[in-house]
Image (tube, helix red, strand yellow):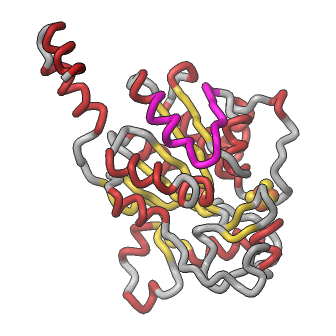
Amino acid sequence: MREYSDLIYKYTRVDHLPHIWCAGCGNGILTRDVAVAFERLKLEREKTVVVSGIGCSSRAAGYLDVNTIHTTHGRALAFATGIKLANPELHVVVITGDGDCAAIGGNHLIHAARRNIDLTAIVFNNNTYGMTGGQYSPTTPTGDKGTTAPYGNIDRAFDIARLAESSGASYTARGTAYHTLETIQAIERGILHKGFSLIDCYSVCPTYYGRKNKKGSAVDMLIWQRDHGVPRARYDALSPEERQGKFPVGILQQNDYPEFIEQYQRIIDGCETEQERSAFIHD
Ligand code: SF4
């Protein structure tokens, strides 16, 4: 594991340190997992782009030393779509949070998934809006508290992986800040996958979500992930009774639906002459 810890320096803009994350935040662990996946895939820096939105998660784009763009709230997938369409050779990875991706950016999420465009979205899911003070988010469990839900959240929480799958994403997976190996592998396979891939990674936010909900220290929150998350192969072998209160970690589903850019290119290739292409555009 130490080799992985050292890798973060290879992919970090050290002149941007110290980082802004709180002590015990899971976002640093997940950012390291992204860097390890890049290294294991031997991605070229010049051909790798990280796009982020707004929130604690999205600061990761500032620290990772590849091509990065820190965009507007909820719009990371829209920027990423433009980048990928302009240059399909690039590996385009979006780092986003539960609020950024499933609330203000929810519309972009469902349409990126529906198009099955070849992007990888990595969600640092901490169950709250950490950067703005702990408001409840689309993944705050029902009954849990936030600054805007002092008596408990009455909304039902989104399962972002299932939301993406039902919208058309051809690859979905779950990671956690605790399950390092499974999370790195899920990110790697998501990047390799042709189509829209989403890895919903449970982070830990001891400062807001944890404190407001009496979850204990950052270590206690990681222990909770260890005790409730089960690697996919082992999860599949559990009986329905044994699965109660547990969740699978790893790949959740993978399909080979048609990919958006390939279909788009087919239309372009079908226009044999410049005149046809011009007529196609102006029709
Ligand atoms: Fe991490 Fe929460 Fe602090 Fe944000 S507020 S940096 S999510 S611990």
Q: Give the residue at the far top of this rendering.
A: 274
- Residue 74 drawn above or below residue 126: above
Instruction: Give the mark count.
Output: 0
Q: Give the residue at the far bottom of this rendering.
A: 241
In which image quadrant can residue 143 be found?
bottom right
Residue at screen point 69% across, 42% down? 60
Residue at screen point 71% across, 62% down? 129
**Span shown in magenta:** 66-83
Image location (x, y in percent) of residue 136? 69, 71
Residue at screen point 67% across, 63% down? 126
Q: Which of these two is toward me, 83 or 41?
A: 83
Image location (x, y in percent) of residue 95? 59, 45
Q: Give the residue at the far front of this rendering.
A: 283
In which image quadrant can residue 6 be found?
top right
Q: Where ligand 1 lies, by quadrant?
A: bottom right
Q: Is residue 70 magenta?
A: yes
Q: Does the rendering let one see residue 187?
A: yes
Q: Is residue 246 left or right of residue 168?
A: right
Q: Is residue 105 magenta?
A: no
Q: Quadrant of the C terminus?
A: top left
Image location (x, y in percent) of residue 111? 39, 49
